Image (cartoon, rainbow, N blue to C red):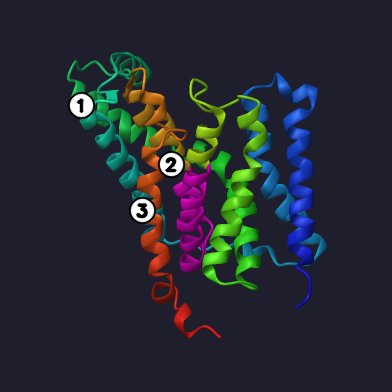
Amino acid sequence: MKPPIKIIHFLILATALTLVANFIPALSSAGNIKSLVIMWTPGLAALVVSLIHKRSLREIGWGFSLKWIALGWIIPVTYGSISYFIIWLTGVGEFPNPTFLERAQFTMGFESENSGLVILAAFFYITLVNLLPSMFLGLGEEIGWRGFLVPELFKRVDFKMTAIISGLIWAIWHLPGIIQGEYGESSTPLGYRLVCFFLLVISGAIILAWLRIKSGSIWPVAVFHATHNGVIQTFFDRLTKYEELTPYFAGEFGIVVPLISMAIALIFLKNSGTSLGLNDRK
């Protein structure tokens, strides 16, 4: 088997660009601009390597299907809802957070005092109205990880290895930002946060690899990525009033969301042979 030169070149370039974006002084104080640049480093690396190796940009997967896009939206909403209902029902996090309700009313210009209507309006505002700008941020990552890396890995190894390898690379790519404390709840031990986050990212990588291969398109995974960020980070997490133990259970660095998403990922992994037609793959 020939060495995976395209993959090696992609990883080298993505690593170099990410390190530059994380540690260049001019970007350190740039806030949202730095985040945008970092999130687009995998996509830029994928596009450059594709041009160098004459890999058709059509292989990224630009086909559009509402069915698959809808599934990319439904999955993170599902595991997010299950996770936070567990958090609220067990009392490790309080529902609702009054501060969230006040800010949601102000942001949307919502005059109703009905908490249920405010929450429902905020949910659709965050997960649908704000979907396109969120997708622009996540699309840079998805072009790299699922538009380039997953299809190239899948040419060489089986689906399970494709999903796990891409997930580990994706998780490691986040390490500079986590170690620098740029995101992630800091009141829990770093080791605990890393275990929870790696579990979440690898489970997400399994689902995303399945979506990308099954749909043949980058758009369902871009929608999944944007919806996850919106529904977990911006909606459910802020809708939850944190208590002393809440950071250990809620958010991307708590344990509940990773466990629920992993349970769903294992269903996709278990049925990948049949659903992806891999049982007949030679």
Q: Secondary structure at mark 3?
A: helix
- The magenta segment is 198-225
Q: Secondary structure at mark 2?
A: helix
- Split into 4 quadrants, where in the image is the C terminus? bottom right
The answer to which image quadrant residue 175 occupies is: top right
Question: Mark 2 Cα within 10 Å, few/some/many (few <14, many 20+)?
Answer: many
Is 8 situated above or below 25? below
Residue 116 belongs to the span the image colors magenta:
no
- The residue type indicated by label 1 comes to Leu
Q: Which mark is residue 263?
A: 3
The image shows residue 16 at horizontal and vertical percentages of 79, 43
The image shows residue 214 at horizontal and vertical percentages of 46, 68
Q: Residue at x 67, y 29 (%)?
A: 34
On screen, residue 272 versus residue 241, left or right, reads right
Q: Which residue is mark 1?
A: 117
Which dot, 3 or 2, sits closer to the camera? 3
The image shows residue 218 at horizontal and vertical percentages of 54, 57
Of the numbered discs 3 and 1, the one sitting upstream in the chain is 1
Q: Which mark is residue 228?
A: 2
On screen, residue 196 versus residue 22, left or right, reads left
Of the numbered discs 2 and 1, the one sitting upstream in the chain is 1
